[in-house]
Image: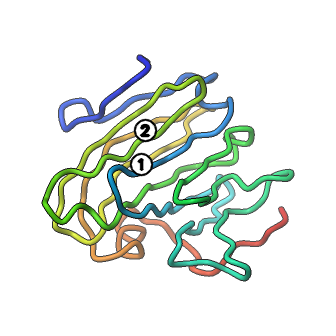
Amino acid sequence: MTPRTILTVDYPVVTLDRRQSAIGSLVVDLAPAGTLSCVWELTDGTSGIVSDAVAGPNGVRTSPMFGRRPLVELRKGQILVGLRHVAELRRLLIVTAGHPADGSPATTVLSLYKGATIESAHKSAEPCISSLAVYQVDGELVVRREGFGFPDVRAAAEAYGFAATWMPPPTVR
């Protein structure tokens, strides 16, 4: 994979190698503005959402903990996916909202270890867009550009077949 990969309708999928899938964190940002949410599912079937709209006690916006860190968390407007325990992740869906009013595209940027990025731009009049789907397959992450519009994050999660719990997940695993 090159340092900058742009996913398009014609080139919608990229597979990260085992090293890219296991070192550091995936950091997801939205530019120029908007909010991010993430619906996640673990290999044991546990699922949930990480979103500003669904915060638990003390503003907790994380998936279950593995060791001292959550696998997925929302911190300062960024989604962070810790890759140390990536084998526990089955899939996740990045959902964006608050796209520019002028109709210009919002770009979801997924940053990897050593500065490589995966980018996907979307224009939409819909309140929420499923921008990226990420699947873990035999220790490698497959990132797919999406682009479907939904009225809210819950509708996006249901459309993708997530049985997400809408309450904060347990903090200890």
- CA distance for labels 1 and 2: 6 Å
Give the residue pinned by disc 1: 133
User: Which element type, helix, strand or loop, lies under badge 1?
Assistant: strand
Residue 121 occupies which quadrant of the picture? Answer: top left
Residue 13 at what x, y percent from top left? 34, 33
Residue at x 29%, y 34% (from the top left corner): 7
Give yes or no for contact between labels 1 and 2 (Cβ–Cβ under 8 Å). yes
Q: From the viewer's perspective, is 101 left or right of 171? A: left
Task: Please tell me how crowded label 2 is: few (under 14), some (14-19), or many (20+) other residues with Cα within 10 Å.
Answer: many
Determine whether 110 is above or below 75 in the image: above
- Nearer to us in this view, 135 or 67: 67
Residue at x 26%, y 62% (from the top left corner): 99
Residue at x 69%, y 52% (from the top left corner): 71
Determine the residue located farthest toward the top in the rendered image: 2
Give the residue pinned by disc 2: 143
Residue 8 occupies which quadrant of the picture? Answer: top left
Residue at x 50%, y 36% (from the top left corner): 111
N-terminal of the two: label 1 or label 2? Answer: 1
Check disc 1 and give the amino acid type: Ala
Residue 93 occupies which quadrant of the picture? Answer: bottom left
Check disc 2 and give the amino acid type: Val
Determine whether 43 is above or below 168 in the image: above
